[in-house]
Amino acid sequence: MAASSAQAGLTSSITTVSGIFDSMEYGPNPEAANSAQAWLESHKRSLGHFIDNQWVKPTGRATYTTKSPANGEVLATTIQGEDEDVELAVGAASKAYTSWSQLPGHVRARHLYSVARHVQKHQRLISVMESLDNGKPIRETRDADIPLVVRHFYHHAGWAELMDTEMSGWKSVGVVGAIVPWNFPLMLLTWKVCPALAMGNTVVLKPATFTRLSALLFAQICAEAGLPPGVFNVVTGNGAFGSKLAGHPGIDKVAFTGSTEVGQLLRKATAGTGKKLSLELGGKSPFIVFDSADLDAAVEGMVDAIWFNQGEVCSAGSRLLIQETVKDKMLQKLRDRILSLRLGDSLDKSIDVGAVVDPSQRATVERYVEEARAEGAEIIQNVECVPANGCFYPPTIINNVQTSSKVVMEEIFGPVVVILPFRTAKEAVALGNNSNYGLAASVWTENVSLGLEVALSMKAGSVWVNGHNMFDAASGFGGYRQSGYGRDGGKEGLYEYVMPTWAEKARPTPAEVNYKTFGSYVPASVSTAIPSRNEITVDGQNMPRVDRTYKVYYGGAQKRPDGQYSRQILSPAGEVIALVGDGNRKDMRNAVEAAHKAAPGWGKRAAHNRAQIVYYMAENLELRRSEVASDLCRMTGQSMEDALREVDLSVQRLFYWGAYADKYGGSVQETQLYGATVKIHEPIGVIGIACPDVCPLLAFVSLFAPAVIRGNAVVVVPSEKYPTVALDFYQVFDTSDLPGGVVNIITGNRDHLTKTLAEHQDIQSMWYFGSAEGSKFVEWSSATNLKRTWVSYGKDRDWTDKSQGQGEEFLYHVTQVKNIWIPMGDIFAN
């Protein structure tokens, strides 16, 4: 009787308001799935492709069964597409492109606006479908994913409206093949579709194998919103089917989000085809906590950074770097915090962490953790919160690991964070950047100066100060290094879906390239021909001219080529007019090393100082105007008038780029953040440049100048046939106060030197203006470290034309965008 009375008293206290606050117990709070289940039932739980605004279910196709990760419930079957399905979808998109691309921007804006409105009308249906399909909590799809989808369509409706003014000089690319992963099935789809459609392209989308349903639902909603047939199409299939889509000759641009390994395969598959490619890949983002941070806020930030979406986020803060003075305190707070995290059914509005997308992914996460345990790491987990059924993995902390540990270096893609201590800010930056990736980072400190300096020092596309995983349509998202290239969102994201108005689609004839033998080194043969103008008469006495020795140039000094070979430079008449160094791999390695030594200091110089140096170049080139023009005449056979014009255009182009040295630093993005989101145009690093033979001086200037004014260092292979005007330029560099190593010049066989640069792991971008075969080799080779590329596919451009020889296209190729998110709220709550 007494026991019963005590139990009754406990029950009574819990059901009171004060009792609930004392216990902090949650009850189940499920979201109804009726509407989503009804939509699936309306299709008899068997879905086909969505092509040309129609459901397409070819006979004889294999199917894939989609199950809810939370409980294993079978949701629907979908088609495993084949070649004919890709053909049908690309054909529909190509047909639609002819009319869609010609619509006024205002009309496209209305269509995107209509899609936004219709998504809002079905917002709850889509949220539930996404949670069922992916396993993520309904709170995340309802409050984060779908509102951001709507935001992107509204934002890009504005860009469609403004394209004629804000994107003048650019036009649509054509048909876009979009391939997206399973962690944010609808949101990442939107990041590709919105800018593509806004700029006048059409899209064929291939969703991830695990998560196809929300993409198909969304396609139907687009048709309901009045989007014309063929503008947006969805085809389903396995991973190999995505490669078929990317490789279809009717695809003009591939937009991919996924793993680094698949991104590398796509880079190789599309090499030499002329297709544009943007890659948003993996990450191992640092979450840096200083002893000046609000530790309680940092702990909640860590919850958002690694346990949001079960850690299945490419920008997850999976490396927790803590200053030693507060490491133990921070770790204890994290131990306590994971004990209160709730795992459960994705449709329960009270849970914190949902199910991992698939048993195979759960097994991968577990394997990483157990390998760390075997290495002696401390594993901290809340195993008590894991439901008995469903594809769940407990929130996990790994402590006491080495910087070279596998769990520190590789992307786990699950609810697992590893901890590393640091002592000083410099060490924190070094540890943060000690990764092949460069997608995102966050800095936690109440010291504004420290936070901004560390943010600027991080090699990552997005850096959040006192926050993590904040996204907005007005701010581009994308990475550095093996996190890929290109941006999703913001004006910077539009450039991935356009091409210069003067350009035609690059459709090179398929080139067969032997990647092992391409550019093999064969020293140039030297004949016994005597160079012309070899004698001079002084006081009636004939004598040999003082020998002019052309060497290679790196580190601010002339160097004899490592191989000690020379190559002949011939006039149009076949006369030997000079001998230049025949560079090899060792010369290239030396030049890259010199460039890397120079790049940090050059990048940190005041932009005004860089501008002054480029203006000095123009001044010193003009002083040598007649001399340089004469050299051009001898080499190329052009008239003196044309040669002087090329010199004058080169001077003018140096002035043009000098003007941009301090006028392209970035801007403030107008995101929904209460604070400031600052876009920084950062230098790429060290750029390799292989110049064309046409306009040997003007092309050389037009390529190196934009790179250096934005803080890059370059290694240049000048015109193979006419290199001496570039070699003479080192006198201009030396008299213009250019620091040694900023511009390095190696002469020789273009393809042999390009091979070394393209394969070099410490070159961040490679530009090649040569043959179609060389272009294919550069793109294929770049896949190893995912360096950016800019190639000509064997086509010449008119370097004398301002639209082709200067402008925004060049600025796009010499910079990469970093967005720094700086929140406010000390005075006013937002």
Image (spheres, rainbow, N blue to C red):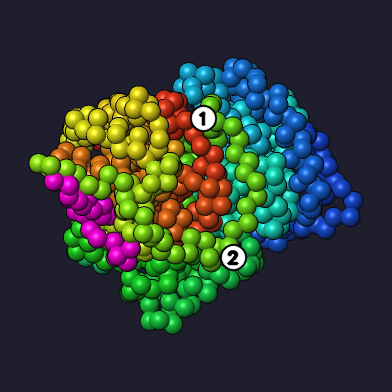
* 628 up-or-down from 297: above or below: above
Tag 1 residue: 500
Quarter in which the C terminus is drawn? top left
Local SS, label 1: strand
Q: Amino acid at mark 1?
A: Pro
Query: Which label was assigned to residue 175?
Result: none
Q: Position of residue 754 (x, y in %)?
A: 43, 55
Q: Position of residue 736 (x, y in %)?
A: 16, 38
Pick whichever, 466 or 652, lies toward us.
652
Does residue 754 appear anywhere in the picture? no
Instruction: Say whether disc 1 or disc 2 marks the residue closer to the N-terminus.
Output: 2
Quarter in which the N terminus is drawn? bottom right
Q: Position of residue 31 (x, y in %)?
A: 64, 45
Viewer-side label of 1, 2? 1
Q: Start and end of the magenta stretch?
A: 541-565
**Residue drawn 9% across the image and 41% down it:** 539
Count neighbours of disc 2 (C-alpha within 10 A) and say few if under 14, some if 14 to 19, many if 20 or more: some
Pick whichever, 583 or 204, lies toward us.
583
Q: Position of residue 793 (x, y in %)?
A: 55, 44
Local SS, label 2: helix
Q: CA distance from mark 1 to mark 2?
A: 42 Å
Residue 725 is left or right of residue 213, and the answer is left
* 226 up-or-down from 676: above or below: above
**Residue drawn 68% across the image and 25% down it:** 100
Tag 2 residue: 361
**Residue drawn 71% across the image and 23% down it:** 99
**Residue drawn 90% across the image and 51% down it:** 59
